[in-house]
Image: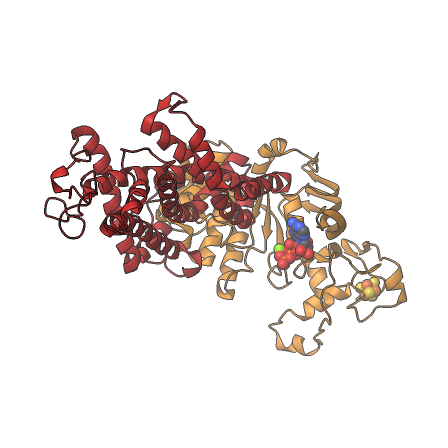
Chain colours: A red, B orange
C-alpha cells in the first residue's frame, strides 16, 4: 500500500473557509484547503489581486474606524484658496495635484479627493460585503434545500429564483430608494440609506448563488457518503449542514469574491443615479456623478473615482478567478 | 442455523416520469421479486452483471430505499415499512459497506470524524472514549491509529475502503451488506481487503451479504451464492454446488468467464461468450428474462416464466432446461 501523500504540514493556513466549514472541531491534518492555498500562492496574478484587495480592505477599515474615532480624514475642508474663482476648477495642472493633495481637489468645493476616495471606500466596501453576505446566506440555504430535497420543494424554489431574476432590479431600486422617508425602521440618515442599499442589492441577488449551490448539491447528494450518513441514522439537518455544507465552502467562497465587485458596481450605479447614500457623505458613485458635470474642464476629477472603482473591481475579480482555479476539484 | 434476515417477494420499481407534467410513463424494474434468507454467521453472495439490481437490493436491505412490494424481516421483525425514526435504532444492527471508496468518505471530514460518526449519531458512549474507540477500530482494520487527523484524500483506495469498513464496524452490526467492496480497487489490493473481511467475520461473528459482479471474487468467502439477472434471482445454491454443478445457463456462462488456475481442468471447458447486451430493466423480456441471450432457449422460454424451484436440496434454479440436472 502506498504511503499517504506528503504535503508539508507547516504550510501557512489562510483558512478563509473556516467560518463555513465549522464542522469537525479540532482539524489538524493536511486539508484540501492547504493544498488550495499552495496552488493559490503560485498564481501571481491572483495573489496581486489578493494583495490589492487586502490593502483596500485595510484602508477602508482604517478610513471607517480612524475617521469615526479621531476625525483624521479632512473630508470637509473646503480649500477655496486653491480654486480658480472664475472657472470654479482647481488651480494648477491635473486637477490641482500637489504634495498636500496627491489626487488633486474637487472643483468648486475644493475638498481633497484622496480623503474623499478613502472615506468612500469604506461605504462602498461595507455595502458590497454585507449585501454579498445577505445574498450568500439566502442563496446557500435556498440552494441546498432545493437541491437536497428535490421534488416540489425544488420546483417551488426554482420558480422563485426565476421570478427574482426576472425582476427589474434597477427600476425597483430607484423607486424604493425614492419613496423611503428619511426616518424609517428606527434608522435615519446614512445608516438608513446604507441598510436600504444592502437590502436592495443583497436580497435580490441571491438566486445567482442559489442556482450554483443547488446544482452542486444535486451532484453531492448522490455521493455515497450521504447514504453512509443516512445508514447511520443521521437526521436531515446533520446531512445538510455537517455533510453537504462543508463541501460547498469552495463554491460559496469563490462566488462571494466574485459577487463583491458586482455589488460594488451596483452600489456605484445607484449612488451615481442619486439614490445611494446622500451627500455630503462621499461615495465613489456619487463622486463620479459630480464629476460628470466637469468632465470637459476637469477630466482628472472623473478619473479618480473611476479608477478607484476599476482597480477595486479588477482586483476582486482577479483574486476570485484565482481562487476558483485553486479550489477547482478537476484541477486536483 | 438462525435466520437473521428473510426476504420475500421484494420489489423496487423506480417510476419513470416524462414531460412537463411529470406523468408516469413506465417503471425501471430494478428489483423484481426476490426471495431468500440470510442465516446468522454466513456469507451470502449476490452476483450479477452491472445494472441487474444488486445495489438496489443492498439499499433495500439496509432500508436506505423503501420497497415497492414484498417483505423484509430482520430477526423475525417486519422492517419493510418502518419509518425513518423507527429505523434509527435498527441502524446499529444493519450496516453497509459502499462500492466506491472515493465517494463514500466525506472529503471534508477527517478520518476521526468519519469513523467516529456512528458513535455520535447513535449517541453511543464507549468505555474508552470515542477517540480511543476510533483508534482501536483503525488498528482492527489494519490502519495506523495515528492517522486519526488525516483527510481521506491522503489515502489510497484500499486504505479508504478500510476506513469505510472501520466505520461500518463501529456499532458492532449483526448484518453487513457489502456492495462490491473491492471492485473499485486494484487487483493486487483486492485480496487484502477480502482477507480482512474474512478475518473480521471470524473474529466478530459477522454476517455478510456480499455483492459482486463476477463469481471469482466471492468464490472463497461465500457460503451460499445467489445469481441475479435483471432484478430476479435465477439460481441460489451452496457455494460448492454452484461452482461445480451450476444449473442455470446464465451461471454457467458467468462461470466460464472465471479464470481457472488449473490448466488440466481448463482444457475440458469451453468458454461461453454471452452475445448481446443486457436488456433494459425498463422493458425486460417476457417469460424467461434470459431467453434473448440463452443458447438453450426454446419457445417455452419465451412464453412461460420458469419459477425458482428447488431442483436439488438447497439448490434453487429458475430454468426450464437446466444444465447438470440432478439424476
Ligand atoms: N434512483 C433510481 N432511479 C431510477 N432508476 C434507478 C435508480 N437506481 C437504480 N436505478 C436503475 O436500476 C437498475 C439497477 O441498478 P443497480 O444500481 O441496483 O444495479 P447494480 O447491479 O448495482 O449495477 P452495478 O454493478 O453497475 O453497480 C439500473 O438500470 C439503474 O439504472
Ligand atoms: S428457461 Fe430457457 S431461456 Fe431461460 S435460461 Fe432456461 S433454457 Fe435459457
Ligand atoms: Mg451497484
Is residue B326 visible in this depiction of the protein? no
The image shows residue A243 at horizontal and vertical percentages of 48, 42
Q: Residue at x 60, y 35 (%)?
A: B90
Closer to us: B185 or B76: B185
Is residue A107 visible in this depiction of the protein? yes
**Is A234 placed left or right of B139 in the picture?**
right
Closer to us: A191 or A294: A294
Q: Residue at x 37, y 55 (%)?
A: A321
The quadrant of the picture occupied by the N terminus of chain A is bottom left
Q: Total of numbered circles in the picture?
A: 0
The image shows residue A67 at horizontal and vertical percentages of 20, 33
The image shows residue A149 at horizontal and vertical percentages of 59, 40
The image shows residue B316 at horizontal and vertical percentages of 78, 55
**Is B190 placed left or right of B247 in the picture?**
left
Closer to us: B152 or A237: A237
Closer to us: A306 or B146: A306
As drawn, A170 above or below B102: above
Instruction: Tell me the quadrant of ligand 1.
Output: bottom right
The quadrant of the picture occupied by the C terminus of chain A is bottom left
As drawn, A158 above or below A41: above
**Is B227 placed left or right of B286 in the picture?**
left
Q: Hey, which residue is sitting farthest top in the picture?
A: A186
Amino acid at each position: 500500500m502506498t504511503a499517504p501523500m506528503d504535503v508539508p504540514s507547516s504550510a501557512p493556513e489562510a483558512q478563509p473557509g473556516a467560518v463555513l466549514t465549522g464542522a469537525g472541531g479540532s482539524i489538524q491534518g493536511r486539508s484540501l484547503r492547504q493544498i488550495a492555498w499552495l496552488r493559490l500562492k503560485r498564481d501571481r496574478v491572483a495573489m496581486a489581486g489578493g494583495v490589492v484587495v487586502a490593502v483596500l480592505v485595510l484602508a477602508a477599515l482604517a478610513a471607517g474606524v480612524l475617521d469615526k474615532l479621531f476625525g483624521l480624514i479632512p473630508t470637509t475642508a473646503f480649500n477655496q484658496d486653491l480654486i480658480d474663482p472664475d472657472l470654479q476648477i482647481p488651480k494648477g495642472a491635473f486637477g490641482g495635484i500637489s504634495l498636500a493633495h496627491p489626487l488633486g481637489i474637487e472643483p468648486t468645493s475644493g475638498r481633497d479627493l484622496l480623503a474623499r476616495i478613502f472615506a468612500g471606500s469604506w461605504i462602498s466596501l461595507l455595502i458590497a460585503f454585507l449585501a454579498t453576505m445577505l445574498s450568500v446566506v439566502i442563496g446557500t440555504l435556498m440552494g441546498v434545500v432545493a437541491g437536497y430535497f428535490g421534488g416540489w420543494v425544488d420546483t417551488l424554489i426554482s420558480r422563485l429564483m426565476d421570478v427574482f431574476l426576472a425582476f427589474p432590479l434597477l427600476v425597483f431600486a430607484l423607486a424604493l430608494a425614492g419613496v423611503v422617508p428619511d426616518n424609517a425602521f428606527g434608522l435615519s440618515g446614512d445608516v438608513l440609506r446604507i441598510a436600504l442599499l444592502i437590502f436592495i442589492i443583497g436580497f435580490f441577488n441571491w438566486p445567482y448563488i442559489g442556482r450554483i449551490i443547488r446544482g452542486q448539491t444535486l451532484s453531492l447528494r448522490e455521493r455515497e457518503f450521504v447514504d453512509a450518513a443516512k445508514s447511520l441514522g443521521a437526521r436531515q439537518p446533520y446531512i445538510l449542514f455537517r455533510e453537504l455544507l462543508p463541501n460547498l465552502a469552495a463554491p460559496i467562497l469563490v462566488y462571494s469574491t466574485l459577487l463583491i465587485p458586482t455589488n460594488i458596481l451596483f452600489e456605484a450605479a445607484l449612488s451615481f443615479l442619486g439614490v445611494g447614500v446622500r451627500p455630503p457623505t462621499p461615495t465613489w458613485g456619487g463622486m463620479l456623478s459630480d464629476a460628470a458635470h466637469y468632465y470637459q474642464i476637469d477630466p482628472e476629477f472623473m478619473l479618480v473615482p473611476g479608477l478607484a472603482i476599476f482597480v477595486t473591481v479588477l482586483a476582486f475579480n482577479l483574486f476570485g478567478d484565482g481562487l476558483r482555479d485553486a479550489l477547482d476539484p478537476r484541477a486536483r | 442455523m438462525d435466520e437473521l434476515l428473510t426476504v420475500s417477494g421484494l420489489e423496487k420499481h423506480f417510476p419513470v416520469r416524462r414531460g412537463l407534467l411529470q406523468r408516469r410513463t413506465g417503471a425501471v424494474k430494478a428489483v423484481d421479486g426476490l426471495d431468500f434468507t440470510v442465516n446468522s454467521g454466513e456469507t451470502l453472495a449476490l452476483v450479477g452483471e452491472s445494472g441487474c439490481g444488486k445495489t438496489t437490493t443492498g439499499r433495500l436491505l439496509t432500508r436506505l430505499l423503501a420497497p415497492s412490494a414484498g417483505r423484509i424481516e430482520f430477526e423475525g421483525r417486519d422492517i419493510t415499512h418502518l419509518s425513518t425514526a423507527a429505523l434509527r435504532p435498527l441502524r446499529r444492527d444493519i450496516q453497509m459497506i459502499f462500492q466506491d471508496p472515493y465517494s463514500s468518505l466525506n472529503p471534508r471530514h477527517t478520518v476521526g470524524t468519519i469513523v467516529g460518526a456512528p458513535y455520535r449519531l447513535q449517541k453511543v458512549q464507549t468505555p474508552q472514549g470515542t477517540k480511543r474507540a476510533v483508534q482501536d477500530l483503525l488498528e482492527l482494520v489494519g490502519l495506523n491509529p495515528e492517522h486519526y487527523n488525516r483527510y481521506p484524500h491522503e489515502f489510497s483506495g484500499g486504505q479508504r475502503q478500510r476506513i469505510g469498513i472501520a466505520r461500518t464496524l463501529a456499532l458492532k452490526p449483526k448484518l453487513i451488506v457489502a456492495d462490491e467492496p473491492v471492485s473499485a480497487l486494484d487487483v493486487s489490493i483486492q485480496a487484502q481487503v477480502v482477507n480482512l473481511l474474512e478475518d473480521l467475520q471470524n473474529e466478530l461473528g459477522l454476517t455478510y451479504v456480499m455483492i459482486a459482479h463476477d463469481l471469482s471474487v466471492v468464490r472463497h468467502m461465500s457460503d451460499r451464492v445467489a445469481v441475479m439477472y435483471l432484478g430476479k434471482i435465477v439460481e441460489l445454491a451452496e457455494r460448492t454446488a454452484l461452482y461445480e454443478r451450476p444449473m442455470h445457463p446464465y451461471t454457467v456462462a458467468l462461470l466460464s468467464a472465471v479464470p481457472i488456475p488449473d490448466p488440466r481442468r481448463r482444457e475440458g471447458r469451453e468458454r461461453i461468450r454471452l452475445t448481446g447486451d443486457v436488456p433494459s430493466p425498463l422493458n425486460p423480456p417476457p417469460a424467461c428474462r434470459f431467453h434473448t441471450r440463452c443458447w438453450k432457449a426454446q419457445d417455452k422460454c419465451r412464453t412461460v416464466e420458469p419459477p425458482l424451484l428447488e431442483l436439488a436440496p438447497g439448490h434453487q434454479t429458475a430454468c426450464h432446461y437446466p444444465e447438470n440436472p440432478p439424476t
